[in-house]
Amino acid sequence: MKVRSEQLPQSLFFTILLLLALEIVASTFFPIIGLVRFRPAFNILIVLYVGFKLETPFVALVIFAIQYFHSFFSVEGWAAGTFAGIIICMIISYLREMIHFSTALVTIVVVEIFQIIWFIIASLLLYLKTDNITYVYEKFFRFIPESIIIALVAPYCFTILDRIWHSRNERKLLGDVS
Amino acid sequence: MGLVEHEGNRLKHFINIVFLAVSLYSASTTEYRLAEISFFDRFLINALAPIQKGLSSTKDYISSGIEHYLLNVTASRENIKLKRDYSELESELFKIREIEKENRRLKALLEFNSEIPLKKVLAEVVAWDASSEFKVIRINKGSKSGLRLQSTVITTQGLVGYVYRLTDNFADVLTILDRNNKVDAVLERIRAHGIVEGYSQDKCIMKYVGRKDPVVLEDILITSGLGNVYPKGIKIGTVSRIERESFGITQYIEVKPSVDFSRLEEVVVLLSLDDKTLDQEWNVLNKTK
């Protein structure tokens, strides 16, 4: 989906509002209902959407904005996620013609695959910085359930993001072609 | 048309390369020990944290509302009225009991470590870090309550961490479970020094303890007071696992924190009565660098 420059600020603003709402849910609501150990990373989901769907030279800027606002909810900061997100978007740009979100199942599987790639990039950065493979190994077991939750909600979140980025005329993510 | 697309691609590649380079540089140089915040950061945290706090505090209301609605939906009108009255009374009683429990906890918190000559500020936990990778909690007290960066945070059970990010009304606490938090510790029984680092959701590791030091299971760890962050003598946890080889310089020690982080509700922030001494020490250290 080609994004016009004048459309970008408005859609980005609403995307960030959605991210803030999801981050508040992840950082506050999930812990109070007992999900203390696992926090689904909604920022990854939104960055993946940006990579999959948006065709604009300012993809890196959008990813940076998303990661910057994510950093208010996490000590993780914006840098590692921005790096991983841009690399993922570059990979997606070469595979875009092969990826079609024809059904919800395809969306879930594709999102899961790219989350694994994200995990590999982020873990590599972490390993290079800390020189501690045990930590990465332990992180992997937390990543599995978190990524599955993200993949399962992806079709619904992508539908909301489609509305935000005005891609209603394109092929829908839950399988129906308009 | 082709030329315009080509120009667009060149711009895209340029922006990608710039952001990749900046983020890689930032990722490699950023330390998580202390976070400098701008006016905009402060504004956003102050705007968002009350929403998190509101969600936290409505937990009891939501759960009690759902419970009471489900209980009453199939009963007769009289039963509904009686049950409603009963529920209200029970809810009141529950609230009173909760307040009583809270009072007891707060009293214990205030009386805890009364020998430490520091001012204490009570705070409530309002949110947790958005990423499960990092063990940070957000509390509802900030610089307006006298908190400062690196203020020590404790409970009656022991050490929680230190304040690493601060706004007027809220503060983020880097807990001892986080791998970025390093505490200079002493084994209380044998007085051996080491560094305690966060490791996972419920354990830390103690590094640099000599192989010949006679550490045993359940040995208690306390803060050493070195490093100018934590006061001396605060309980950190107990030794839960030891791996000692016949070779090497140090031994591998796992520590079970004395604080139950999954049940953390209120904490105490320790404030130095006279920060001038600390400032002078920092100034001297900075000059020697």
Image (spheres, coloured by chain):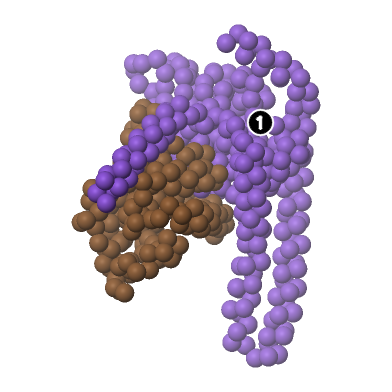
* Residue B55 in picture, x, y percent from top left: 62, 59
* Residue B177 in picture, x, y percent from top left: 52, 37
- Which residue occupies the foreground of this view, A119 or B70? A119
Q: What residue is at 62 percent from the left and 62 percent from the top?
A: B59
Mark 1 secondary-structure assignment = loop
* Residue B178 in picture, x, y percent from top left: 51, 36
Amino acid under disc 1: Leu
Say whether residue A63 is left or right of residue B113: left
The residue that disc 1 covers is B149
Q: What residue is at 28 percent from the left and 48 percent from the top?
A: B5
Q: What residue is at 60 percent from the left and 41 percent from the top?
A: B41
Image mark count: 1
Q: Residues within 10 Å of mark 1 (few under 14, many from 20)?
A: many
* Residue A104 in picture, x, y percent from top left: 31, 67
Say whether residue B107 is left or right of residue A139: right
- Which residue occupies the foreground of this view, B142 or A80? A80
Looking at this view, name the residue that lies furthest to the left. A98
Chain that bears disc 1:
B
Q: Is residue A117 above or below residue B63?
A: above
Q: What residue is at 56 percent from the left and 26 percent from the top?
A: B183
Q: Quarter of the image for the C terminus of chain B: give it.
A: top right
Q: Is residue A178 above or below residue B230?
A: below
- Which residue occupies the foreground of this view, B133 or B83? B133
For residue B155, say whether it is visible: no
Q: Which chain is purple?
A: B
Q: Which chain is brown?
A: A
Looking at this view, name the residue that lies furthest to the top. B288
Image quadrant where residue B174 sits = top right
For residue A172, say whether it is visible: yes
